[in-house]
Image (spheres, rainbow, N blue to C red):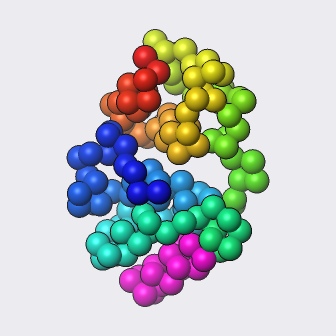
Amino acid sequence: MTDFFEFEADFVDSLRCIPMQVRCKLDTCGIKLKLSDWNQMTKAEHQALVELACTTETEIQFYHDHIQQIIIQRTGIPATKLPIEPHPAWLDSATVPASLQEKAQEIGVTLTQQHWAALTPLQRFALIKLSHPGHENKNFKSAIAEFHLL
């Protein structure tokens, strides 16, 4: 999976920010990666983290170990581990998270269960992440538009 979202277009070429597909893999394997650590990696390391699969139990463990190895090489300190959500909301196509629904309503959008189910897991992940406090509203609105939810 090497598709990027349109709302990421301003940094995709340089990969100066962590793209959503890598963020999703980080959440899946239980790693908190700081932007400062990401910025110490080479372009080849960024590209590998984009391209590596992180779906099966074996792939998830490999991804976790691989990124830890890179971070230790670059910083001398392992990345912080995060608890792995056993049933992540982005994989549940039947239920729109209430916090996401509230954020969408702030910009005049009502997300139906049908809208939610039609999205890919990565699109659902992106909306959940972008709806958290601290993210720029423009990216949330841009994602809503990109996913044809207006």
Quadrant in the picture for residue 18: bottom left
Would residue 103 appear left or right of 41 to someone viewing this image? right
Q: Residue furthest right?
A: 86
Picture coordinates of residue 46, whole percent (x, y): 36, 69
Residue at point 29%, 72% (across, down): 43
Residue at point 59%, 57% (across, down): 27
Picture coordinates of residue 56, whole percent (x, y): 68, 65
Residue at point 39%, 83% (across, down): 74
Residue 71 appearing in the image:
yes
Where 92 sits versus 96, above or below? below
Where 69 sits versus 33, above or below? below
Q: Nearer the viewer, residue 138 or 122?
A: 122
Q: Does residue 64 show up magenta in the picture?
A: yes
The residue stretch that appears in magenta:
62-80
Residue 137 appearing in the image:
no
Q: Does residue 90 show up magenta in the picture?
A: no
Picture coordinates of residue 55, whole percent (x, y): 63, 61
Would residue 72 appear left or right of 82 to someone viewing this image? left
Would residue 16 appear left or right of 140 to someone viewing this image? left
Q: Nearer the viewer, residue 92 or 32?
A: 92
Quadrant in the picture for residue 80: bottom right
Would residue 135 appear left or right of 44 to someone viewing this image? right
Where 54 sits versus 72, above or below? above
Residue at point 71%, 53% (across, down): 85
Q: How many marks?
A: 0
Where 76 sits versus 5, above or below? below
Picture coordinates of residue 88, whole percent (x, y): 69, 46
